[in-house]
Amino acid sequence: MTMKSRCAGAAGLALAVLALAVGAAPAVAETATIGATDADLVSVTLDGDAMSLRIRDAGQVARDVPGYDPAEVVLGPDGGLAGRVPAKSALAFLGPAGQPMWSLSTGDTGFPALDTTGVPLGAVTEDTVTLRLRSVEGPGTFTAYRLSGLEGATALFGSGTNLPRSLRLPAATRTDGVVWAFDAAGDYRLTLTVSADLRSGEAASAEATYRVRVPEIVPAGQVLPSAAQPPRPGSQPDTAALAPTVAEVRPTATPKPLAAPMAPAAAKTGTTTETGTQQVIADGHVDMGPQLSGADWTIRIKDDRTSPAVWRETADVVLWIKDNAKITVPAGADFLGAQGDSVWLLPQSQQSGIVWPGWNTQHESVVSGIKGDVTWTLKGVDGPGRFALFLTGSFGEADVLFDSATSFPQQLAVPLNTHAHGNWAFSKPGLYRLAVQMSGTTTAGKAVTDTKTLTIAVGDSTDPSGGFGSGSGSGDDGQDQDGTGPLPRTGAGWVLLAGTVGVVLVIAGALLVLLARRRAGANPEGS
């Protein structure tokens, strides 16, 4: 065999080996795309002295299971929200007013969170985990911030000028109401690190790179250039691009829809139901929601202050809003009162020392036994002042869900497996009783409904124990507050009562006139 043939044979053998090697190489898995709605964008766990940093979607959060390696998924481009920086100082860290922005959040519910519940209390020094933004690669500026209350927002970390690059997170805590915002379209890579000092004196840390795909940023109402992607069907025009907007409640027979979580998932199990134990709740997380047991459909309060959570009867619970929740009404929030007025506000995001009520349709009996939305109806409000429940959007806009200053009933459509929080506002101290109804249709086609009273004590000067007893937990309008006389009423029950009293007075007046005329006829000369 000649040298030439030997070389040719060797070359052929090499090519064959290379082909086999290439063929034997494992296929690279495609990167999954997930949404940020109700997700834990940062999920930190500590196993012994090993720390991990992952991301959990809504289903994984609901099932309380480990999440994805951030390198294996892409956040966006679907499911986000385009808007503009409003003309308010609280969000000035995002840039100049009117600057187009895009956030991972879908709207005014389902905000993602930063989760350290996988780090037990007592495991790290000062029970604190440090989250650091190590680097950002992308065409624009990235900002992470947290919404709080009506006009409150706090910059957490970001790549912009004067923004912090690190954040100290309390251990065993889920920090909700977080927004990740970007000011330019394109692909981003965010490298985050988490670290903590262990009680043993050793250090634990983890690092992950997040991939975010930001679409063309087209705020609602903006005219698109010819090459840009058209807006999704159903987008609404932005009538005030540079200022927050307030959507007034319009009573209608068609329930207003509420954004659903990204994917259905059964709620965590292990909860219990307790009856007869009265609870005044002034701090911690609670939810109002229905349960289905056979043909019985019941609204209860889920008390998450303990683990496992306890479902309580509404008659056994009074929520107490203390004066540490009192704020001043800012300009542009006319649905809360005049600028400068005081209002007691339970914010959409959890704050220490303030009760944090929400609503959910996550009980496993509801998720598996109901088809379609659950309709939440506010039938009336009994209290000394005005009540409003509203949502705060990613860029500070307010969306009013319920308002006692408008006519009843008012309705809200809540999709199955929803867990949401809003801002609960009360204009005066005292006892409030909200007549709430939740309705649905079972998978067998049967309509189910329940009406209960949600009782709230507002102000340090209000005795919450006065909320127990008659009028609590039923669909009836509220009763008088002990020792203070009748409460002013703003709900439908007061309207009906006033109408009834008016009719009685008219009839009584007519009878008196008739009687006087008869007496005059019987004694024409007078007395």
Image (tube, grey):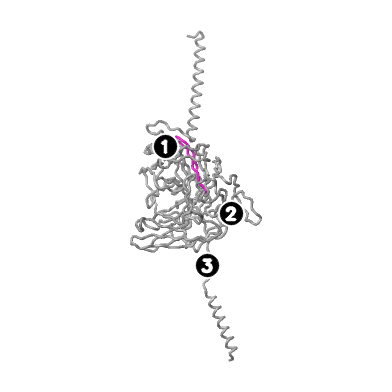
| Magenta-colored stretch includes residue 203 | no
Prevailing secondary structure class for the magenta stretch in the rendered image: strand
Residue 86 locus on image (x, y percent): 54, 47
- Please provide the residue range marked out in magenta: 377-393
Residue 160 locus on image (x, y percent): 51, 55
Residue 172 locus on image (x, y percent): 39, 55
Tag 3 residue: 29
Is 439 in front, or is 416? 416
Mark 2 vs mark 3: give the one in front: 2
Tag 2 residue: 217
| Residue type, label 1 | Leu
Q: Quick one: which residue is furthest to the bottom in this view? A: 1
Left or right of residue 340: residue 215: right
Q: Identify the element where label 1 is drawn.
A: strand
| Magenta-colored stretch includes residue 384 | yes
Q: Identify the element where label 2 is drawn.
A: loop
Could you give the CA–CA distance between mark 2 and mark 3, rounded to whole angstroms?
29 Å
Tag 1 residue: 431
Q: Is residue 177 above or below residue 489?
A: below
**Sequence-wise first label, 2 or 3:** 3
Q: Look at the image and tell me whether residue 299 can be seen.
A: yes
- Residue at coordinates 51% horizontally, 21% vertically from top-left? 510
Q: Quadrant of residue 455?
A: top left
